[in-house]
Image (spheres, helix red, strand yellow):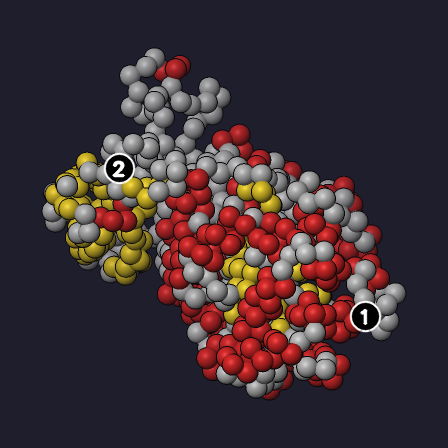
Amino acid sequence: MKSQQLRQLLDSLSLDEKIGQLVQLSGEFYQAQNIATGPQKSLGITQNLVDLSGSVLNVTGAEQVKRVQEEHLKKSKHPIPLLFMADIIYGYHTVYPIPLGIGATWDPKLVEEAYHNTADEASASGVDVTFAPMLDLVRDPRWGRVLESTGEDAMLNSHFARAMVNGLQKDLPNGRGLAACIKHFAGYGAAEGGREYNSADISLSNLKQNYLPAYRAAVDAGAKMVMASLSTLNGVPGTGDQWLIDDMLRKQWGFDGVVISDYASIQELVDHGFARDREDAARLAITAGVDIDMKSPCYANGLKQLLNQGRISEEKINQAVWRVLSLKNDLGLFENPFRGASIERESHSILSSDKRAVARKMSQEAIVLLKNEDEVLPLAKQSNKKIAVIGPYSDEADLIGLWAVHADSNDTVTLADGIKEKLNDSYYSISKGTDILRDKKFFDQFGTAEESVKRSISSNEEEIKQRQKSLKNAAKADIIIFACGEHPLQSSEAGSRVLLRLPQNQVDLFNELVELQKPIITIVFSGRPLVLTDLVSKSSALLQAWFPGTEGGHALADILFGDYNPSGRLSMSMPYIEGQLPMHYDHLSTGRSEETSQHNSRFVSRYVDSPSKPLFPFGFGLSYGELVYSKLVMERSQLKLGETVESYVTINNIGNYNRYEVVQIYFHDDVASVAQPVKRLVDFKRVFIKAGETKQVKFSIPINQLGFYDRKGNYQLEPGTFTFFAGSDSMAMLSEQVELIQ
Ligand code: BGC
């Protein structure tokens, strides 16, 4: 539709029709038999507004979407198609590793391809918009939604943000693809104490330096929508933050797409103590620039009164409706309200072999090898050694994490499935040993149905039998693979924890296995970095598998048997103990740095009962074989503003394996008017290097990227020296200095 026609459509709408466009309802409004006594009643909005609502949440499936759209269009005087929005965070039916695993790939190109595939699958099922990617930077793995983040670094997150948006939106011009709704704007990832929905307090310089860049990158890549955060940032709830939405996002960054609230977050402005009542909440949200109210009655019931009372202008409503109609128009819904939805397309696209292949590649790249003593890995496919695969994740299909809400874990390849494809039956045994979690109280707190608790927790007799069987298997084996981890319910939304350990029943089983004094290869499945200190010290090798997705079992077996040389590198520090949290590699040095201070060792910045360093630093990960960093050359020693410095890092693969290496470059601004992090990632390259090969890897670093934000939020780049570091992780040691002159 031409812009002029769209304007005419807007002008022809009644106030109720306009308000309807700003209301989003969830699936039950379109599916329930008698909505007047069901969800509609509990939400408390009129049938008229239900009929006029502009978008729908989490209804998927070509058949279903077509039916809902058809019925909706019959009801409207002005037939304006619904927008179908859904949470498709890291895959639709073909699920990738959780975003924290995606972060560990350091491979934005592959991520773009994967998200492009996701858009193909989900648009075939009638989805128009996905509430992804989540771009919240996280430094505290107690927060359950760390699962949805690509990690703790602003620069790395920005690369993934661009890749995900580009992948999702690539096919929009062809009537397919998904519009990306980036979330949760902003600061939600800094929830105090890692407690879900808690407030964030972030200085302006920290916000601009660390928490906003991934958003900016996604907006610059053309993301069509933004979701405002339901949490508070420096006391102001994201849903009512005019400074963030109207001033920064729209005016400064030039974002002209749609802003949506989070689930019921407009009405929660009252609970925050920020709005007097729901009407006031509607006023604050629309004034801040929130266009769509997701699942609260505030816009539906409040906007008309606010207008009549002169507390908001009709122009404000018109602007919001215009943005919603423009998105529908950009997606081509007026011409084809069903867009890509097609049962036929679904049957070709969903879980197709090429999509599974990309998921397998992504899982391979996401898994991080954290220890490999005496090169116990890779395992030989042909040897007389017997392997006992033990643990609750040894044949578990739920490897997709809690936010893969549209996928089915029955489509997942388990670890046992993967191993079966590599080994002859007589060389391995599989036994569960124990449940993932045997704490009934844990399930009871969510009101889990008795039946499903029973499915999760075996009877005591069954548990004893399982344990005995696995100990027997272990006794007969030469090598043990221990497949352990968190329960999916222990991470993701509302999955904050204070103790980031394996459930005690798994620890007990592990310790019994340790007593057998056989090599143990531990595989950890989790939605976050756990505290692995004890597990690492007692294992010969350890693989961090995250929730690795639909193809997880294949990818793990590929790594275990050397068909893929692990290349994953942590995008988040792994704590030594929970009391260190929050932690991040790009901290300041303090006046009393543990490493460099001249003070007596008591009076330096450290803990008296724990190391202050992480167990594994940001950027860390092993591969098979050995590689050394031999040289860092900065082409120039002096530069002026606007110039670029070329640098060369020499790496030598001195081992027997071909591999990928993620070459990382960090810098430190030696003296600045605002103290700067000890190191900041400035660039990286993922390169393939053959056994015995030497490679020189080139980087071009624009000096203007080395600035910082001062206390007033202004970007500064001050003359002086900068130290660059190169290496395989954030402890990178090769260093060279460069000076910025005036
Ligand atoms: C979450 C969002 C999600 C929304 C819709 C909320 O609880 O915070 O991330 O997109 O629900 O399902």
Quadrant in which residue 129 is drawn = bottom right
Secondary structure at badge 1 equals helix
Q: Residue tagged by mark 2?
A: 669
Disc 2 on helix, strand or loop? strand
Q: Where does the image place residue 509, in percent across and percent down from the top left? A: 62, 41
Residue 47: which disc?
A: 1
Amino acid type indicated by mark 1? Gln
Question: Foreground: 719 or 482?
Answer: 719
Ligand 1 lies under 8 Å from the Cβ of mark 2? no
- Residue drawn at (46%, 22%) of the image: 607
State the count of labels.
Answer: 2
Residue 126 image position (x, y, % from top left)? 61, 77
Front residue (pair 683, 66):
66
Picture quarter containing residue 594?
top left
Residue drawn at (58%, 42%) of the image = 236
Q: Is residue 601 above or below residue 224?
A: above
Res 86 seen here: no
Rendered position, 283 above or below 221: above
- Measured as percent of width and height from the top left, residue 58 is found at 66, 67
Which one is in front, 377 or 529?
529
Q: Earlier in the sequence, mark 1 or mark 2?
A: 1
Reply above or below: 120 against 403. Answer: below
